[in-house]
Amino acid sequence: MEQVIAKKYARALFNAAKENGNIEKYYDELKGILNMLKNKQIYKIITNRGIYLKQKMNFVDAILEGYDREVINFLKLIISKHRESIFDEIFNEYNKLYMDYKGIINATLISAHPLASETLERIKNRLESNFNKKVYINSTVDESILGGLKILIGNKVIDGSIKGKLDTLLKNLVTAS
Protein backbone atom coordinates (compact mmCIF):
# COMPACT_ATOMS: atom_id res chain seq x y z
CA MET A 1 0.00 0.00 0.00
CA GLU A 2 2.78 2.43 0.93
CA GLN A 3 4.50 1.75 -2.40
CA VAL A 4 1.33 2.78 -4.26
CA ILE A 5 1.12 5.97 -2.22
CA ALA A 6 4.82 6.70 -2.78
CA LYS A 7 4.34 6.26 -6.55
CA LYS A 8 1.43 8.73 -6.57
CA TYR A 9 3.40 11.38 -4.69
CA ALA A 10 6.50 10.86 -6.85
CA ARG A 11 4.52 10.96 -10.08
CA ALA A 12 2.74 14.17 -9.01
CA LEU A 13 6.01 15.93 -8.22
CA PHE A 14 7.67 14.58 -11.37
CA ASN A 15 4.83 15.87 -13.54
CA ALA A 16 5.07 19.27 -11.86
CA ALA A 17 8.85 19.25 -12.40
CA LYS A 18 8.34 18.38 -16.06
CA GLU A 19 5.86 21.23 -16.52
CA ASN A 20 8.28 23.68 -14.87
CA GLY A 21 11.37 22.29 -16.61
CA ASN A 22 12.90 21.47 -13.21
CA ILE A 23 13.28 17.69 -13.33
CA GLU A 24 17.02 17.80 -12.60
CA LYS A 25 16.69 20.52 -9.95
CA TYR A 26 13.92 18.70 -8.06
CA TYR A 27 15.92 15.47 -8.24
CA ASP A 28 18.95 17.15 -6.69
CA GLU A 29 16.85 18.85 -4.01
CA LEU A 30 15.02 15.63 -3.12
CA LYS A 31 18.39 13.93 -2.79
CA GLY A 32 19.45 16.74 -0.45
CA ILE A 33 16.33 16.29 1.66
CA LEU A 34 16.89 12.54 1.79
CA ASN A 35 20.41 13.17 3.10
CA MET A 36 19.10 15.65 5.68
CA LEU A 37 16.57 13.11 6.91
CA LYS A 38 19.44 10.72 7.63
CA ASN A 39 20.39 13.10 10.44
CA LYS A 40 18.66 11.56 13.48
CA GLN A 41 17.84 14.92 15.09
CA ILE A 42 16.20 16.30 11.95
CA TYR A 43 14.32 13.05 11.41
CA LYS A 44 13.06 13.08 15.03
CA ILE A 45 11.72 16.62 14.66
CA ILE A 46 10.00 15.88 11.35
CA THR A 47 8.40 12.63 12.55
CA ASN A 48 7.52 13.63 16.13
CA ARG A 49 3.73 13.86 16.39
CA GLY A 50 4.10 15.77 19.66
CA ILE A 51 5.46 18.81 17.82
CA TYR A 52 2.84 21.16 16.43
CA LEU A 53 2.48 21.11 12.66
CA LYS A 54 3.11 24.87 12.42
CA GLN A 55 6.44 24.44 14.24
CA LYS A 56 7.41 21.64 11.84
CA MET A 57 6.54 23.82 8.86
CA ASN A 58 8.69 26.67 10.22
CA PHE A 59 11.51 24.18 10.76
CA VAL A 60 11.19 22.93 7.17
CA ASP A 61 11.33 26.51 5.87
CA ALA A 62 14.49 27.10 7.91
CA ILE A 63 16.39 23.96 6.89
CA LEU A 64 15.36 24.17 3.23
CA GLU A 65 16.18 27.83 2.72
CA GLY A 66 17.21 28.30 -0.90
CA TYR A 67 15.28 25.25 -2.13
CA ASP A 68 12.58 25.57 -4.77
CA ARG A 69 9.25 26.61 -3.22
CA GLU A 70 7.46 23.68 -4.90
CA VAL A 71 9.85 21.15 -3.33
CA ILE A 72 9.44 22.79 0.08
CA ASN A 73 5.66 22.69 -0.25
CA PHE A 74 5.88 19.06 -1.38
CA LEU A 75 7.75 18.11 1.80
CA LYS A 76 5.26 20.10 3.89
CA LEU A 77 2.40 18.20 2.24
CA ILE A 78 4.07 14.88 3.06
CA ILE A 79 4.51 15.98 6.68
CA SER A 80 0.94 17.27 6.99
CA LYS A 81 -0.38 13.92 5.69
CA HIS A 82 1.92 12.01 8.12
CA ARG A 83 3.79 10.32 5.26
CA GLU A 84 7.30 11.25 6.46
CA SER A 85 8.18 7.61 7.03
CA ILE A 86 7.86 6.83 3.31
CA PHE A 87 9.92 9.76 2.02
CA ASP A 88 12.74 7.43 0.98
CA GLU A 89 10.25 5.34 -1.02
CA ILE A 90 8.90 8.51 -2.64
CA PHE A 91 12.44 9.49 -3.56
CA ASN A 92 13.12 6.01 -4.98
CA GLU A 93 10.01 6.27 -7.15
CA TYR A 94 10.98 9.77 -8.31
CA ASN A 95 14.45 8.40 -9.05
CA LYS A 96 12.94 5.66 -11.26
CA LEU A 97 10.92 8.25 -13.19
CA TYR A 98 13.99 10.47 -13.50
CA MET A 99 16.21 7.64 -14.74
CA ASP A 100 13.61 6.51 -17.26
CA TYR A 101 13.13 10.08 -18.51
CA LYS A 102 16.89 10.52 -18.88
CA GLY A 103 17.29 7.12 -20.56
CA ILE A 104 19.53 5.74 -17.82
CA ILE A 105 19.69 2.19 -16.47
CA ASN A 106 21.41 1.06 -13.28
CA ALA A 107 22.91 -2.41 -13.52
CA THR A 108 24.53 -4.54 -10.87
CA LEU A 109 27.27 -6.77 -12.21
CA ILE A 110 28.30 -9.69 -10.02
CA SER A 111 31.50 -11.58 -10.72
CA ALA A 112 33.52 -14.18 -8.84
CA HIS A 113 36.64 -12.00 -9.06
CA PRO A 114 37.27 -8.26 -9.56
CA LEU A 115 37.09 -7.32 -13.24
CA ALA A 116 39.53 -5.13 -15.14
CA SER A 117 38.24 -1.68 -16.08
CA GLU A 118 38.51 -2.56 -19.81
CA THR A 119 36.25 -5.59 -19.28
CA LEU A 120 33.73 -3.49 -17.37
CA GLU A 121 33.78 -0.90 -20.17
CA ARG A 122 33.13 -3.58 -22.83
CA ILE A 123 30.22 -4.98 -20.82
CA LYS A 124 28.84 -1.47 -20.30
CA ASN A 125 29.06 -0.70 -24.04
CA ARG A 126 27.35 -4.00 -24.89
CA LEU A 127 24.50 -3.31 -22.45
CA GLU A 128 24.10 0.25 -23.77
CA SER A 129 23.80 -1.01 -27.33
CA ASN A 130 21.34 -3.75 -26.32
CA PHE A 131 19.09 -1.46 -24.27
CA ASN A 132 19.65 1.80 -26.21
CA LYS A 133 20.13 3.58 -22.90
CA LYS A 134 22.99 4.93 -20.83
CA VAL A 135 24.09 2.27 -18.34
CA TYR A 136 25.69 2.80 -14.93
CA ILE A 137 27.31 -0.34 -13.57
CA ASN A 138 27.76 -1.17 -9.91
CA SER A 139 30.28 -4.00 -9.83
CA THR A 140 30.40 -6.42 -6.90
CA VAL A 141 32.33 -9.58 -6.16
CA ASP A 142 30.61 -12.77 -4.97
CA GLU A 143 32.88 -15.81 -4.95
CA SER A 144 29.88 -18.13 -4.50
CA ILE A 145 28.96 -17.76 -8.20
CA LEU A 146 32.22 -19.66 -8.93
CA GLY A 147 32.87 -17.94 -12.27
CA GLY A 148 31.18 -16.09 -15.10
CA LEU A 149 28.90 -13.10 -14.58
CA LYS A 150 25.48 -12.26 -13.25
CA ILE A 151 23.85 -8.97 -14.26
CA LEU A 152 20.82 -7.47 -12.50
CA ILE A 153 18.86 -4.72 -14.26
CA GLY A 154 15.64 -3.80 -12.49
CA ASN A 155 13.75 -7.08 -12.15
CA LYS A 156 15.66 -8.69 -15.03
CA VAL A 157 18.47 -11.17 -14.29
CA ILE A 158 21.05 -12.22 -16.84
CA ASP A 159 22.76 -15.21 -15.25
CA GLY A 160 25.90 -16.37 -16.99
CA SER A 161 27.49 -17.62 -13.79
CA ILE A 162 28.83 -21.14 -13.41
CA LYS A 163 26.68 -21.59 -10.30
CA GLY A 164 23.58 -20.54 -12.30
CA LYS A 165 24.41 -23.01 -15.07
CA LEU A 166 25.00 -25.80 -12.55
CA ASP A 167 21.69 -25.02 -10.82
CA THR A 168 19.87 -25.12 -14.17
CA LEU A 169 21.57 -28.42 -15.08
CA LEU A 170 20.59 -29.89 -11.69
CA LYS A 171 16.94 -28.81 -12.14
CA ASN A 172 16.86 -30.34 -15.61
CA LEU A 173 18.30 -33.62 -14.28
CA VAL A 174 15.78 -33.73 -11.42
CA THR A 175 12.79 -33.11 -13.74
CA ALA A 176 14.11 -35.67 -16.27
CA SER A 177 14.27 -38.45 -13.65
Image (spheres, helix red, strand yellow):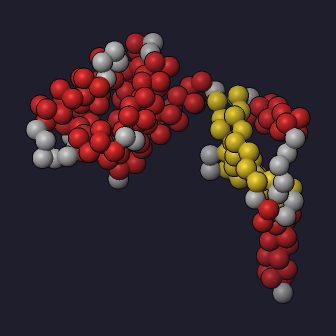
Residue 71 in view of the camera: yes
Which sits in the foreground, 72 or 55?
55
* Residue 99 pos. (x, y %): 57, 30
Which sits in the foreground, 168 or 81?
81
Residue at horizontal 26%, vertical 45%?
44
Please indicate whether residue 71 sits to the left or right of residue 112 in the image: left
Which residue is the extreme one toward the top? 21
* Residue 55 pos. (x, y %): 13, 32
Which residue is the extreme one toward the front? 41
Vertical order, 91 against 170 (above or below): above
* Residue 38 pos. (x, y %): 40, 41
Residue at horizontal 74%, vertical 45%?
139
Residue at horizontal 25%, vertical 28%?
60
Please indicate whether residue 3 sits to the left or right of residue 72 in the image: right
Residue 168 in view of the camera: no
Residue at horizontal 30%, vertical 18%?
65
To which quarter of the image does residue 66 belong? top left
